[in-house]
Image (spheres, rainbow, N blue to C red):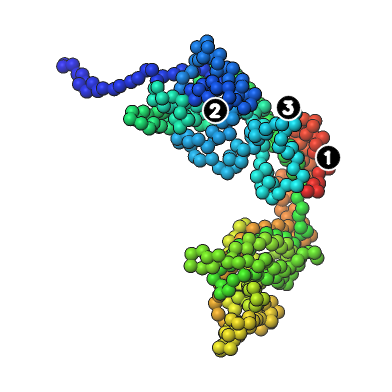
Amino acid sequence: MADSWNTDTGEAVYRSRDVEELVVGWQEKFFSQYEMELFQNEAVCQTPLDRQYHKEVKALNRNKSRRNNRIFTYTDHDRYTNCLLFHQLVGCSSPTFLAERMASVRHRRQDRHTMDCSIPKSKIVNWEPTEEFVKSSHVVNNAMQTMHIMADLAPPGSLGQKENECLLVTIKTDGNGTVILKPDFNKGKEPYSRIVTEGERREVWRLTVENVSTAMKPDDKEKEQNMYKDLYVRHKDYLNSLVGQDFEMPPGGILRYLMNGEIISAKGFEYDNLYIHFFMELPNNWSSLPFQSLSGVTQTCRTKTSGKENVAYFSFPFSFETFYMSEKEKSIPQWPVLYFKVLSLDFWQRYRTEGYGYLLFPAIPGKHIITCHTWRPLQIGTVSALRRFFIGGSPELEDNSYVRIPGTFKGERLSRFGFYTETTGSVTFNLHCMQQARAFVDASMLKKRRQKVFDQLGGFSQQGAVCTILEAFQRARTKMQEARESLPRDLISTTSQPPFESSA
């Protein structure tokens, strides 16, 4: 058999002098070429840290003991650590607003220039904070140390220019053993970034981050997993003990209906400066708490152009809690209704009715986004239109429930013959509805159900069935006591204390 060989030998060019291997310890300072040139001059040193760096740079130059060339670091106390969060790192997203605020807060102490050794120039306590100060200072400030590993990607012989510095890895840690690494280890994936330098050579660099730590032993790994599992179980038991098993339930035969709603927006109306007046109507067998307000009015909102329509964004919240009581198990014939009226009031105090509408409470609990269309009464004639334009005022309904069939109407058919209306705009609602009920069971029905359970036990007497239920209850109670004894004492003492009431 004839031998086979590959005739495509190919060709590649490699440069070994660009390879640099450096072992970096936590918060270990390695100077860049730019810093080596900067701190040689004692005149540029402004802080004690700068003067310390000046001494170290002089010692490195004198002993010729510098171990790094391209790779260098910025430690937690360096002046550049704040700014490096915004340097370009190929493959990573731009910083968020919160990241920018955290960057300015984390090293706030570095911006304090002291007049002497003990008194900071900046204010420690601001007794009269402005609104802008509160917004800029209301940021979570965890005590974390930061370290950046950098690289100077300039061509050989041109090191020391800031524009050629690139952020490779950012490492953060706190006192609780938490370590944050950005970017994360590649874990066998492709390199994070492909950096092409400027200039004639157009050099290409690729970033790969690998974890070369000693692998954890199987026994230690299993112990750690068991520890976390036990911690999660204890925390779950602790939360369950705080919540408890007792929930507020309505009496038997009563449906509790809670609605947390929001008037999102109104659009398509003729005039600006809109506000909405609304109220709730309760049908028969429905009631509310004595202190519950059944009506409300929004703020006056100016419209803004969105597409081809003018939209007024209210974002007005409201809440209703009602009860339906019935002594029989049957479907609910009527649900509460929310009636609303859209009005406008301009600079000259001209008041106009823009539209009427209604919202029927959803029969299904959950989240609902509903858009209700409106109309307004229309009076035929030029005089009415001129009055509405110049001095305001327009026909109104004496009873707002006339938008639909009023609850007080006792006839078979409501006639609106001869009543003129005009279609106006629409109002959008965001509703979160919850229903809570306990079935109503009378004595005879309860007796029948109990007898049915005893008949299904088969071969046991009623006395034996009761004993079986009591034994099961006793076993469950024993398990609960054993689980409670296994909890730490501090958790048990915490759950026994009365709940804390905040006055904020």
Q: Residue furthest front?
A: 43
Q: Identity of the amino acid at label 1? A: Gln
Residue type of the residue flagged with mark 2: His
In this rendering, the label closer to the viewer, 3 or 2:
3
In this view of the protein, which residue sits in the foreground, 9 or 480?
Answer: 9
**Is 374 located above or below residue 212 in the figure?**
below
Q: Which residue is mark 1?
A: 497
Q: What residue appears at the point 54 percent right and 40 percent down from the top-left corner? A: 95
Mark 3–mark 2 distance (CA, rounded to whole Å): 29 Å
Percent across and percent down for residue 436 are: 70, 57
Q: Nearer the viewer, residue 492 or 91?
A: 91
Tell me if residue 77 comes above or below residue 353 in the rendering: above
Residues at marks 1 and 2, CA–CA distance in whole angstroms: 47 Å
Question: Which residue is located at x 59 percent, y 71 percent?
Answer: 272
Q: In this rendering, would 182 be left or right of 240?
A: left
* Tag 3 residue: 117
Q: Which residue is mark 2?
A: 148
Q: Position of residue 91 (x, y in %)?
A: 45, 36
Where is residue 94? Give x, y as percent. Answer: 51, 40
State the SS at label 1: loop
Cβ atoms under marks 1 and 2 closer than 8 Å: no
Q: Quadrant of residue 19?
A: top left
